[in-house]
Image (tube, rainbow, N blue to C red):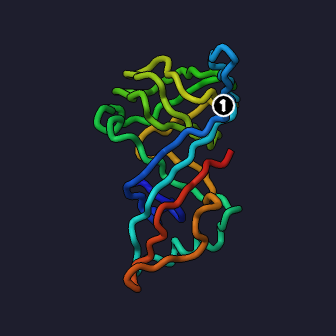
Amino acid sequence: MYGIYENNKIIAQFVVPMTMRSNQPVFVSDTLSLKRVVRKRAAQRWELDTRLTPLSTSAQDLMVSFITKGHYGTLTIIVPQNYGVISARTSTSTPNAVGSAFSSQLTVTGNSGLISKGTFVNFTGDTKLYMTTSDLTDNGTLNIFPTLRKDVSGAMRHLDNVLMSCKYDTDTVIGMTYENGTLMDNGIIKLVEVL
């Protein structure tokens, strides 16, 4: 189950439609000969557009989160994994990963089974969210996107326990919206990763 995570529980579950987007500044221009020139920056963050399960008798936790966090406070979510990743993975272990800052490769040990490419991961001591770009069966080298922002050495979360620190985007209603007088439904909310 994926959603907004507070006090060791999900206070609002994500439902479709949902979009997980990589935001990486790119500068594109065309020359007079129509050759395309593209430059990308190293900075990258994840952005999630999602709906939440409409709530009635348990809406107070979500309402307090909207009001107290506003557009400036940090909240935690359990990151939704791609359905293809979930159906392909056979690893249920919590492996260790070692990697150096600015590298796109990790050395993984203590893994048993398949970690599929496209899996969202993060590491002890680093709240940044990464995505695997290669498959890994058992131990070995695992490629990730974006490059590591700092050295990592420790446990790697890759199952349905991957956490992301984020903020409510400025388009998100900071309050409550009711449907039919009893259901709290704020429509699509946007969450942006805290870097």
Residue ID at (52%, 50%): 48
Q: Quadrant of residue 17?
A: bottom left
Residue ID at (62%, 27%): 147
State the quadrant of the C terminus.
top right
Relative height, residue 34 to residue 46 (above, below)? above
Count of marks, rendered view:
1
Could you tell me the amino acid type at mark 1?
Answer: Val
Q: Farthest residue toward the front?
A: 32
Q: Farthest residue toward the left?
A: 87
Relative to residue 29, is residue 52 drawn left or right? left
Which one is nearer the viewer's eye here, 27 or 192? Answer: 27
Label 1, residues with CA under 10 Å away: few <14, some 14-19, many ≥20: few
Relative to residue 78, is residue 91 drawn left or right? left
Mark 1 = which residue? 26
Q: Position of residue 72 (x, y in %)?
A: 71, 62
Q: Quadrant of residue 26?
A: top right
Element class at badge 1: strand
Q: Position of residue 130 (x, y in %)?
A: 55, 35
Residue ID at (64%, 40%): 125
Q: Position of residue 80 (x, y in %)?
A: 43, 47
Residue ID at (51%, 33%): 131
Relative height, residue 66 to residue 178 (above, below)? above
Q: Farthest residue toward the bottom?
A: 181
Q: Quadrant of residue 87?
A: top left
Which one is nearer the viewer's eye here, 113 or 173? Answer: 173
Relative to residue 33, is residue 4 drawn left or right? left
Q: Position of residue 30 (x, y in %)?
A: 66, 22
State the quadrant of the N terminus.
bottom left
Relative height, residue 64 to residue 130 (above, below)? below
Which one is nearer the viewer's eye here, 180 or 127? Answer: 180
